[in-house]
Amino acid sequence: MGRIVVDVMLKPEILDPQGQAVRGTLPRLGFEDFTDVRQGKRFVLSVEGEVTDAHLARAREAAETLLSNPVIEDVVDVHELTHDEPEQAAITGEGAAS
Amino acid sequence: MGRIVVDVMLKPEILDPQGQAVRGTLPRLGFEDFTDVRQGKRFVLSVEGEVTDAHLARAREAAETLLSNPVIEDVVDVHELTHDEPEQAAITGEGAAS
């Protein structure tokens, strides 16, 4: 089974209240390093078999028509989820310990 | 300015109603290729100057404590946003044409 990642972010000029809420909370938890936070969406689409260029083209189409609102959002990346990219195997918490 | 990406997904065993809603809509728009959809969150944290290992370590901490709910979510990836990764430069729509 192949998987395709679609990353969607608000356009830079669009106010991001969720990101701002996170940004405001970080210093109160002791995280002083981060000057800005933007929050977006990440979709993982599964396909049968290997991911083909046709699948990626279809995913880009779906990203434009359904997964994002082109008025306020940009599709910033569409790529195959490769095996060297950790996914659904947590890099933190219990998953990382096992 | 450096940027760090934090990807958060629901744990595989957790029901994902947003992903299921997308999954159910795709065929109605003519997208028959996709067998499953999961929807997660993508954060982009900005830091002053270059991204250091210390920044990445702090971002992992923030990912565990604030950006994710460890009961139902996994932090699947924390990495520096590199220049060859498209970001805030849309790969679709007007941005791609210019």
Image: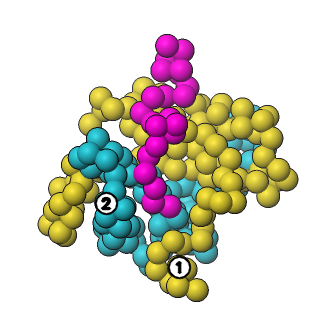
Chain colours: A cyan, B yellow
What is the secondary structure assignment of the residue under circle 1? Answer: helix
Main secondary structure type of the part rendered in magenta: loop
Q: Amino acid at mark 1?
A: Ala
Residue under label 2, please give it. A55
- At horizontal 24% and vertical 54% (from top left) the residue drawn is B34
Residue A29, given in percent of the width and then of the height, sits at 69, 34
Label 1 Cα crowd, 10 Å radius (few <14 / some 14-19 / many 20+): few
Q: Which residues are magenta?
A: A77-98
Residue under label 1, please give it. B96
- Quadrant hosting residue A15: bottom right
- At horizontal 36% and vertical 62% (from top left) the residue drawn is A53
Residue B74, given in percent of the width and then of the height, sits at 46, 32
Q: Amino acid at mark 2?
A: His
- At horizontal 65% and vertical 60% (from top left) the residue drawn is B84
Does A27 appear in magenta?
Answer: no
Q: Closest to the observer: A21 or B92?
A: B92
Label 2 Cα crowd, 10 Å radius (few <14 / some 14-19 / many 20+): many
Q: Is residue B96 visible?
A: yes
Q: Give me the C-alpha separation between circle 1 and circle 2.
A: 20 Å
Chain that bears disc 1: B
- At horizontal 79% and vertical 58% (from top left) the residue drawn is B1
Q: Quadrant of the N terminus of chain A?
A: top left
